[in-house]
Each structure stands twice: as structure tokens, then as C-alpha cells.
Image: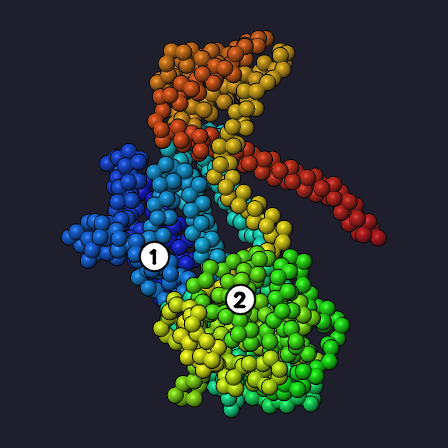
Amino acid sequence: MSGRTRLALCAAAATLMAACSLLPLVSPGTWIVQAALMLAVQSGAGAAARRVPLARPLTVAAQALVMLVLLTLVFARAQAFFGLVPGPEAVRHLVELLRQGGEDVGRYATPAPLSDGIRLMLVGGVLVIGLIVDTLAVTFRTAAPAGLPLLALYSVAAGLSGGGSHGLWFLVAAAGYLMLLLAEGRDRLAQWGRVFAGAARTPGGDPGGAVAPVRTGRRIGAVALGIALVAPLALPAMEGGLLGPAGAGAGPGSGDGGTISAVNPLVSLRDSLNVDEDRTVMSLRTTAGDASGLYMRIVSLDDFDGTTWKPSQRHIVGVPDPFPTPAGLDGDVKRAEITTTVSAAEWYAQDWLPMPYPPSGVRIDGSWRYEPVGMTLVGDHGQNTRGLTYRVRSLDVQPTAQQLAAAPDPAPALKREYTRIPKSLPSVVAQTARTVTEGAANHYEQAVKLQDWFALDGGFQYDTQVEVGSGSQAIAKFLKDKRGFCVHFSFAMAAMARTLGIPARVAVGFAPGTPQGDGTISVGLKDAHAWPELYFEGIGWTRFEPTPTRGTAPSYTQSSTPGTTLPDRVRPSQGASSAPSAAPSASQSCTPELKRLQECPGPSAQAVLPQHDGGSGWPTALAWTLGALAVVLLPLSPLLWRRRTRSLRLGAHGRGDADTVPHTLAVWEELTDTAWDFGILPDESHTPRRAAARIVRLGHLDPVAAASVHRVADAVEQVLYAPRPRPVAGLAEDVRRATEGLRSTASRGTRLRAALAPRSTARLAWAASARWEAVRARAVGMRRAALRRAMPRRWAGRAEAEGG
């Protein structure tokens, strides 16, 4: 097997090993077998083209054509000519499949079902990355830059997957890359021998001396792998969202202590609601007599920065049994304890545990922690809800309108924390809140007026197709346009309540699901919901429902309190409908009476949540900026290093006799390295005169450039052999003229290679190897010297002991 064939096999294997990191994203993973077979055919086409041989661009074009034919054969056979030749119809079909695949990626949480669109994206992506790796490593013989597409392939998988096996897949991908580097190094050694090996390491110049670069490559690979494993620790992590996969857990270990960080759980809610097929998230069986108010709460968002709501960083402890009494709940308020058994779907991997609020106890297997302020449970070190069945005891708190209206002021510390309003919040929010609640006698009446205004009287429409704004003006824009969905309504009502001095936060979870014939309740993706919670002393955190056609209006808001216009009947959730609609929930002609009777047309619960730009602070932005700069500069590092080296070698130097030798040798080294970059390999066995003649011959230099090369060679011979070498003027200009001559006769691909991936950068590896050997030799020498100093003392001590 030739060296290039072996290198092509290693390139395909490295691509496939990196592609394994995509396996957790979809189920089943049978696509990897199909990708492996097609990748083998594509690599074989490249090997055949190189054996012909074809020009490098033609080799890449042949492989791309084979890739297109393979994708057509597998995914668009019915639309192709003779089932194989791609035509306009086949191309349109492939584009449509890619579009559907993009939509499927947004609809489904991981692991997503293996639809045709997703399969085309996976297989096609692996083939494209395989083509790039093969082109760089085999066709253009530069294996090092081939690590960038492999890294991109792994990064996509790591960004989308939330599993705990990132390290394993990274090691697999890194092993494939190192294998590719080692294969290229062996191939180079087989062709160029001592040119890359340097001085022989064994007596007589045995071939064993060529092992040094292999060892150097292994060392550099080990160091690079170590840096790659350590460097991500300094970069910001991407965590899962509301319905996203589980992250790394909450705390450092089980037991007391630890914190849960402020990760915004609304990031994945947008994709969860934006689905055509309402997948079942969990199945409930409850002892509650009326399950229309059974909201499955996941987490509360209490940190409001004027742009978005997010959970504060909270201290977490071990799970108590039973749970403490909810904050603010007095004994005079009517309550009943209910028990709910929850069975989560196998695909639903959530860090936070969905529970009815307020919970009083939970029986669940696994490692979980308790956050006392929000009364939530969060998985510890990768624990999630995937496939779990657990039982929750919770309180069905039933306050009356009179109790809420008579609620005293909360504790100053609590009120200060949960009524905090950022300066960036537009003044129109507070002004609108005061206008809507004008005439209310207490905070309860204000809250009900706000709920009525959003749900019935304010002319708001539940519209899933609204363009969501971002920034501090998002709430003001929603109040002006009066179109949105649950996040808009809950965010706006909570913010307006805070401007009125009512402690408020936003809860995220699931609205009541759909009762089934077997007595269970099915909760689906479209039941994902957000709602405001307002605090009343003596009752605690109390749910309100301002979103039209979603969830149920709490019974304690259906009173005869002045200004309250809610009907006595509850509003069932419309989220379980399987027929999505892009139309708004109500037209301008829908009167409040029709709204109360639920006769207005309603949309599906398909929704798109805003990607709020709450920001994660300047350290995170700085870290991402530095990471992006590193990704951009890494491919350009050979170019930048080469330019810096050329500038130093040809730059200004001293005019004395002592400066003649180093300057002349530096100029000669620059000339030979430049010829190397253009494909003329250095041969250290030649004299300067023979080396110059070789450069002129192989570089097809014109007389002017050839004369410049010979002048530099003559200066080097004078430096090497003359007793007192004299300075020669104009050597740097001679090198520049020779470089222009080499560039003018080289092909476009050779010029591009010489600029972006110069071969002479191999000197970096030699220099690193030499420095490592020097450090190692110095450490060994110091150790031996220490042992020599210690031996006499040991012998003297032993002699004294024996004499004693």
C-alpha cells in the first residue's frame, strides 16, 4: 500500500471518528454506517484520481462530483436521470430535504428522530468534512490544517448535545487527528529521509535517526491535546434550556452546599413550542379532583435586568423530607394535599424537575438537589429526568379574594428584592400599569385588573407569528403592538406588577395537559408555558394567567371585586391541539363577550420565544471574542510566522565585520526556505553553489533572478571559507528578486500554498524538539549532580552508624 493511500485511509478514519460525536444527537444511529460506506467510496475516488494522476483541482472536483452522485443515489434517486445523474429536479429535491432537515433540527430535542432531512444533513455534512480533510491532508499534503474541519465537526456536536460524554467523543476525534498527523509524518519521512530528520542520532548515520521527528510529532500532539482539554475550561460553557438536554449538574457533589447558576431556561422553549407534532413530554396521574389548574412548574425567573427574566444564582442543599412550608403561607388559608405520579418520556432530559407548586415532598431515584427559595429540584452532576417515574406531594392552595385583598405588606427585604426595577425599563411600562389599575383599592385588585386587561379587555391577540423584539424596548413594543404569546404576557405583567410595588416573578413549566381515557393526563411540547407569580403575604407566591386561550384562570381571580370582568368558567388550554395554525388567536371583530364564551378563533400553541439579549457580562463576551480570534488566527498562524521570520532575516543589521556572518547566513536561510515553500526541497548535502544552481534550475528562474541567487550563494561561500569575510551589500534585495522570480513561474495553487501553508514551518517542530531535548538534558544533568552530591553524605552517615 502506497503512502498516499495509507494517508487517505487515515483521513477518512479521522473524519469518521470525529463524526461519532454526532451519534447522541439522533436516534437511531444507523446513519453512521451509511456515512462510512459513502465516505469510503469518496476517498477511493480521490485515490484513483491521484494515481492517474490528475491535477490537484481536478482531483478535488472529481471527489465532489462523486459525493453529489452518491447523495443523489441515496436521497434523490426518483428525481435523477437514470436514478443516478443529478438534474435540476434532483437538486431541488435535495435542497428541499435540507430545508426540512433544518426545520426538524429546530423542532425536536435530542435525540431527534432520524428523518430524511436530518439524515441528509448528517451524511452530507460528514462527506463535506471528509472531502475537506482529504483535500488538505492527502491532495495538498498538509495534515495539520485538516484539524480545523474536524474540530468544527466536533464543535457542532458538542454545542447541540447536552450529554455527559463530551470528553469521550473528544478523545475519539483527537485520536483520529493524531493518527492522521502520524501517518503524514511517516509518509514524509519515507520520501525525504534525513532532510526532515536532521542529524543522525545513531553512529554511522543509521536510519534510526529519522525517528526523532516521529517522536517530536507525538510530543507535539500530546501537548496540543492537553491544551485542547484544558483551554475549554477558561471559555464560557453553553448549557441546556427549558426542554433541552441535561447539563453537567448543579453542584460539586451530593449533600449540602453548592449553587445553581443563573442559566436562562427560556432558550429552548422557543424550539419546543415550534413543532408540528406535539410529542408527549410526560404522563401524569393525580389525586386532584380538578386537574384544570395542575401546572407543572419547572423553575422561577426572579432576576429582571430590564431585558429578560432569568433565575438568580441560588444556594442548593440536600432534598428535605418533607419540604418546608412555602414562604408566606399562613394556616388560615384553605389547602388540600394532592399526590401526582409523573412518568417522563425517554427522550425528555431535563435538569430541573417538573412539579406542581408548591411541593411538599417528592419520592424520586437519582441524585437531586433542592433550591429552597424557588422550591425546585435540580439534577446533580448530569442527573436528569430522562425516563424517570417519580411521585410528588403538593399543596392545592385555595385562597379567597377577600384574603388576597386583605394581605398585609410583605417583609421589606422580600419586597425590595422582588420589586427591583432596572433603570433601562422604559417609563411607558410603569405609566401603563398605573393607567390600567386606576381605581384599584389594593395590590390584589391591581393584579386582577392587569390580568383582565391582558386576557380580555386590552385588545391583545395571541399571535405566534409576531416578530419578537429584543432589548430594553421589547416590553414597550409588546404593549404598543398588543400581539404576542405566553412569554410576552408573563414578562409584561410581572414587570408592570413590580412597578406597582407588587413582588413578582415569572414561572416556567407546562400548562395543564390533556386528559386521556385511562385516567392519565398527557403533557406535550405544546403545553410548554410561562406565567407570572405575584407574592401576597399570608398566601405566598400566587399564580395569575394573563395569556389569552392558554391555561386556566385561577378561581380566586373570578370574584366580584370591582373592576374584575373575568367569567366564572375557566379557560382551558388550547395547547393540545394537533392542528397548528399561523393565524392570530382573535380578530379585531372578536368582542369581549365572545372572548368570555371562548367563541373566538384560536391559534395552535406553536410559538416562537424571543432570544432575549440579557447578556452574560463582559467576561463572557471577552472570552468568546478571544476564542473567535483564536479560531480565525489559527489558520493564518503559518502565514504570520513566515512573514515575521522573513522580516527578521532580511531586516536591518549592523554594518561591522562581526555582523557579516549572521546576516549572510540568515539571508541564505531565507532564500532556501522560500524555495522550499515553492516546492524545491532543501538538500543539506549540497554546497551553496550547487544548491543555488538547483534552485535556479527547478524554479525556472529568469536571468535576473538567477543572478541574484548566485550572488547570495557567493556571499555564503565567502562567509564559510574566507579568513576575513567582507560585507556584501544588497543581499536582502537579491532574495526579494529571487522570491519574485519563483512566484512568477509557480502555479496559482503553489503560490497559495507557499503563502498560507509554507512547508518551511517544519522548522518550528525542529526548534520545539531541540528545546525540549535541551530542557530534558538539563533536568537529567541536575538530577545526576544532585545524586552525586548526596552519595558521599549517605556513605558518611552509614560509616558513622556502623562505627557506633
Foreground tag (1 vs 2): 2
Q: Nearer the viewer, residue 2 or 322?
A: 322
| Residue 323 x, y percent position in the rendering | 65, 82
Establish if 185 lies above or below 171: above
Q: Give the residue drawn at x 38%, y 44%.
A: 133
Quarter occupied by residue 490: bottom right
The mark tally for this picture is 2
Establish if 762 lies above or below 457: above
Task: Answer yes or no: is residue 621 visible.
Answer: yes
Q: Which residue is mark 2?
A: 488
The amino acid beneath tag 2 is His
Judging from the image, what secondary structure is the residue with disc 1 in? helix
| Residue 595 x, y percent position in the rendering | 46, 78
Q: Give the residue drawn at x 50%, y 41%.
A: 632
How far is the residue under mark 1 from the one under mark 2? 29 Å
Q: Nearer the viewer, residue 369 or 553?
A: 553
Residue 423 is labelled as none
Q: Give the residue drawn at x 84%, y 53%.
A: 804
Nearer the N terminus, badge 1 or badge 2?
1
Q: Which residue is mark 1?
A: 99
